Amino acid sequence: MQDQQRVRRTPLGLVAAVAGALLTVGGGAGWLAWNHATSTTAPAPTVSASPKLISPLTEEKVQVYWLNTVKNKIEVVPSSITVKNTDKPSEIIEAALKSLLMGPTDKGFATTIPKETKLKAVSLEADGVHVDLSKQFTTGGGSTSMTGRVAQILYTATSLDPTTKVWIKVEGKPLEVLGGEGLELEQPMTRENFKKNFDL
């Protein structure tokens, strides 16, 4: 009887041990299977190509304003030029004004600014753009010529911001009257008040 009980107890212990081992192995195999499944189904990390080096802009376009006859009427017309890029807007305006004073290269455009006119100084202040020109700016031409040259300076000086105020000086003094016909200028000037007060 004892032998039978011993025989019955031994298989039960063995079964428990084997079952435990199977659970352990099964759990490990299950973990391995799950881990393998997730690692194979998970998307492989994408390796982005190294970004292209973007070189900073070395040039910038700005508008210079010339005169042109459109339907028998003189108009101020823009022409794009390329200038050296800079983080100082005053330098861009200065380059545009210097290009203006050199005269147009396109035969379709004209200027009434005397060729001898020099840009003495230009600065961008809190109250607007200050432009100082040489005395040649005030010589020669009638009222239409005077009005045209003022418009060219005004529009070119405000090419970065059309709402900017402009102060024009000649030889360091505010330009109040231009030409022999006494073209009076109210300073500062804007494109808006120029359109109201002058007609080309």
Image (cartoon, rainbow, N blue to C red):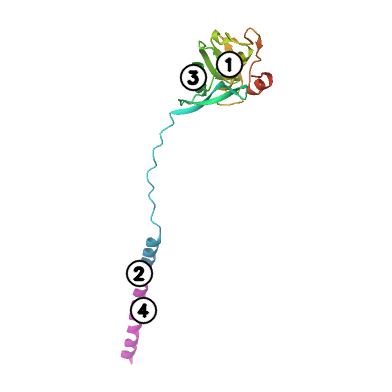
Mark 3: few/some/many CA within 10 Å (<14, 14-19, 20+): some
Q: Magenta segment range?
A: 1-30
* Residue kind at label 2, given as amino acid type: Ala
Q: Which residue is mark 2?
A: 29
Which of the two discs, 2 and 3, labels the residue nearer the N terminus? 2
Depth check: give the residue in front, 186 or 27.
Answer: 186
Depth check: give the residue in front, 22 or 102.
Answer: 102
Q: Which residue is mark 1?
A: 149
Depth check: give the residue in front, 58 or 179.
Answer: 179
Secondary structure of the residue carrying tag 2 is helix
Q: Is residue 29 left or right of residue 193?
A: left
Which of the two discs, 4 and 2, labels the residue nearer the N terminus? 4
Calculate the distance from the C-alpha at mark 2 to the C-alpha at mark 1. Answer: 90 Å
Calculate the distance from the C-alpha at mark 2 to the C-alpha at mark 3. Answer: 81 Å
Figure quadrant of residue 123: top right
Tell which tag, 2 or 1, sits nearer the viewer: 1
Give the main secondary structure of the magenta stretch.
Answer: helix
Calculate the distance from the C-alpha at mark 4 to the C-alpha at mark 1. Answer: 107 Å
Q: Which mark is residue 16?
A: 4
Tell which tag, 2 or 3, sits nearer the viewer: 3
* Residue 144 x %, y %: 62, 15
* Residue extending farthest bottom: 1
Secondary structure of the residue carrying tag 4 is helix
* Residue kind at label 1, given as amino acid type: Arg
Q: Which residue is mark 3?
A: 99
* Residue extending farthest front: 72
